[in-house]
Amino acid sequence: MSDSVPLSPLPRLAGGWPEFLPGWVWLMGAGPGDPGLVTLHGLNALGQADVILVDALVAREVLDWARPGAEIIEAGKRGWVKSPKQKDISARLIEEARAGKRVLRLKGGDPFVFGRGGEEALDLLRAGVGFRVLPGISAGIGGLAYAGIPVTHRDVGNAVTFVTANHPEAVNWAEISRGSPDIVIYMGMRALPAIRAALLAAGRGESEPVAVVASAATPAQKVLETTLGACVEEVARAGLTAPAIICVGRAVLLRQALDWQALARGEAPRSLDPLGTGKGDS
Ligand code: SAH
């Protein structure tokens, strides 16, 4: 703990900002897209790190806040090896830490949400390298918020499920469909036909609302409001591509009222009572 670390852009924090010690690794989530979604702890980390291993989904502007002279290593698809394996990344983190560097592992969203942050932390622990975790805003929460979709809403239900569809055959879609009124799917674009088939088979209707939010919280954000029955064809027609968050459930309807980016452009809300609760006039 020290106030002597360079923290000029940061406000005072009771107890002081954590000091990034040489030989440590900090696992940081940068949030989805918009650099402004980086946390203050993240900003503090960027200002002190010697080496930053950054994933492909992190907005490049975030790196403008790195300490001048910090070494930036691309660990994503454009990275130092074509498609670095998890063990290569962990090995690099350990190697840099053992060389006495302050090592920042910068990931999109939150490092512990479908981001393999837990695996990296375990590798660091087993190697005897000290680490700290800096949570970030996950795409399944913040990305939906940027589309005007509240990830939970009292009139929709009391549960939400976050699921990765990287291996859709490994997901128990029937249980999720029954237990969770809202389903937020990461890495689901390739598996969308399989997801649709599984959810329909589990009893969700063709008319179930679906939103696909591509490149959420970036200037390229595109949102498609569709239905479970039509989503595969409409995604193809709209030309939406990864990264995208898919939201299944009635929370999607709230976008008709809460698309705050459209409201800020002066557009009128499409509905004041998007769930048809009769509360629209109140
Ligand atoms: N740790 C990240 C998730 C990594 S998995 C997080 O917490 O957000 C990568 C997946 O996250 C993508 O395939 C996509 O489904 C989602 N994702 C990440 N950033 C996104 C963005 N800006 N817009 C839409 N989806 C995004």
Image (cartoon, rainbow, N blue to C red):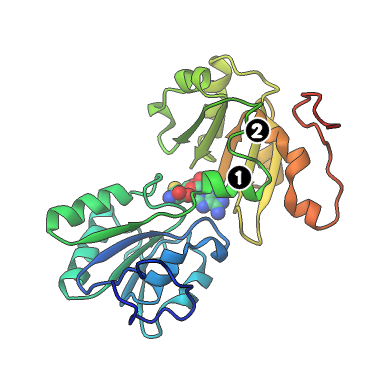
Residue 104, numbered circle: none
Quarter where residue 261 is shown: bottom right
Residue 243 in view in this figure: no
Q: Residue at x 43, y 52 (%)?
A: 110
Depicted 10 relative to depicted 4: above or below: above
The residue singled out by tag 2 in the image is: 251
- Crowd tier of the residue under label 1, counting other residues whose Cα lies within 10 Å: few below 14, some 14–19, many 20 or above: many
Residue 208 in the figure: left or right of residue 107: right
Q: Residue furthest bottom?
A: 69
**Three-letter amino acid code of the residue under disc 2:** Ala
Q: Is mark 2 within 8 Å of ligand 1?
A: no
> Which is nearer the N-term, disc 2 or disc 1?
1
Q: Circle 2 sits in a helix, a strand or a loop, which is it?
A: helix
x, y percentage for residue 103?
A: 28, 69
Q: Is residue 12 visible?
A: yes
Q: Quadrant of the C terminus?
A: top right
Residue at image x 53%, y 55%? 32
Q: Is residue 40 left or right of residue 207?
A: left
Label pair 2/1, CB-CB below 8 angstroms: yes
Q: Which residue is nearer to you in this view: 279 or 260?
A: 279
Residue 220 position, x and y percent, is 65, 59
Residue furthest front as drawn: 14
The quadrant where residue 149 appears: top right
- Front one among 130 and 166: 130
Amino acid residing under circle 1? Leu
Where does the image place residue 72, in percent across and percent down from the top left? 37, 75
Image quadrant assignment for residue 92: bottom left
The answer for how far apart the CA atoms under marks 2 and 1 are is 10 Å
